[in-house]
Image: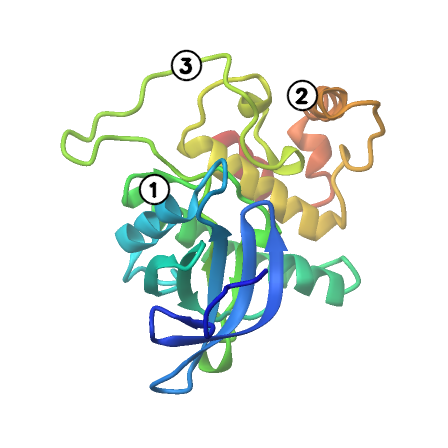
Amino acid sequence: MDLKMDNVIGGKFKLGRKIGGGSFGELFLGVSVQTGEEVAVKLEPAKTKHPQLHYESKIYMLLQGGTGIPSLKWFGVQGDYNAMVIDLLGPSLEDLFNYCNRKLTLKSVLMLADQLISRVEYMHSRGFLHRDIKPDNFLMGLGRKANQVYVIDFGLAKKYRDLQTHRHIPYRENKNLTGTARYASVNTHLGVEQSRRDDLESLGYVLMYFLRGSLPWQGLKAGTKKQKYDRISEKKVSTPIEVLCKSYPQEFVSYFQYC
């Protein structure tokens, strides 16, 4: 990635090494020129076919001030790139899960659940669905905030109600799968427009993944992506919640019934 400049974003943040990447673009370490504070810089080519950084930065702005929401420090165009600067955070819950040999204790899962439900509830209170709830999109803080869970990656987030009238988006069908198949709700697989309950159902699958070590629809083989999604969907629909949560507290079943 050639930034064709002296690598200072917005005249404020010096760009450092690459620390991550994905379909959305790339993530770099940055340092504030004024304070020396380390930050995270997300870049995407300005000419990308499906730009989402501007949209994501707008959602960060609307969510600012909430507990566990990274602070947005700068957004703009820098050379050939859209750039967004946010708090630098620690490992993701997927990283932690791997450090812990892919099994978490009930106590750890409940302590995480408390924070995770609060993050999703806050987003919903601001009128947004996350629509890509997964362990990779929750990060621990750093330093004094090392015990705080942050929610990130709002590229797929969507308003579910009008902020003025509070009217809910209409019920629709024949929607394509948005988000990650492993944690997608049953309704999402069935092509129903997502709503708050779907974020919560996905979060339930994340919690069971942490407790069990894996989900019954993981590792299914298929020829094409579409066939794989269909196999995951079939397995999910045919797995009763009681079976998914077997040998774990009844409250997990109640949680799914609430969704």
Residue at the limit of the structure toward the bottom, as seen here: 35
> Distance of mark 3 from mark 1, alpha carbons?
19 Å
Please report the residue visible at 70 percent of the width from the left and 25 percent of the height from the top. Answer: 229
Residue at the limit of the structure toward the front, as seen here: 4
In this figure, which residue is indicated by the disc labeled 1? 124
Name the residue type under label 2. Val
Q: Nearer the viewer, mark 3 or mark 1?
A: 3
List x then y, in percent, for residue 127: 29, 39
- Name the quarter where the N terminus is drawn: bottom right
- Above or below 72: residue 136: above
> Which numbered circle lies on residue 172?
3
Determine the secondary structure under disc 1. Answer: helix
Name the residue type under label 1. His
Determine the secondary structure under disc 3. Answer: loop
Q: Nearer the viewer, mark 3 or mark 2?
A: 3
Q: Residues within 10 Å of mark 3 (few under 14, many from 20)?
A: few
**Is any atom of residue 241 visible in this view?**
yes
Q: Earlier in the sequence, mark 3 or mark 2?
A: 3
Which quarter of the figure has residue 51? top left
> Which numbered circle lies on residue 105?
none
Residue nearer the viewer, 241 or 26: 26
Please report the residue visible at 34 percent of the width from the left and 68 percent of the height from the top. Answer: 10
- Above or below 24: residue 2: below
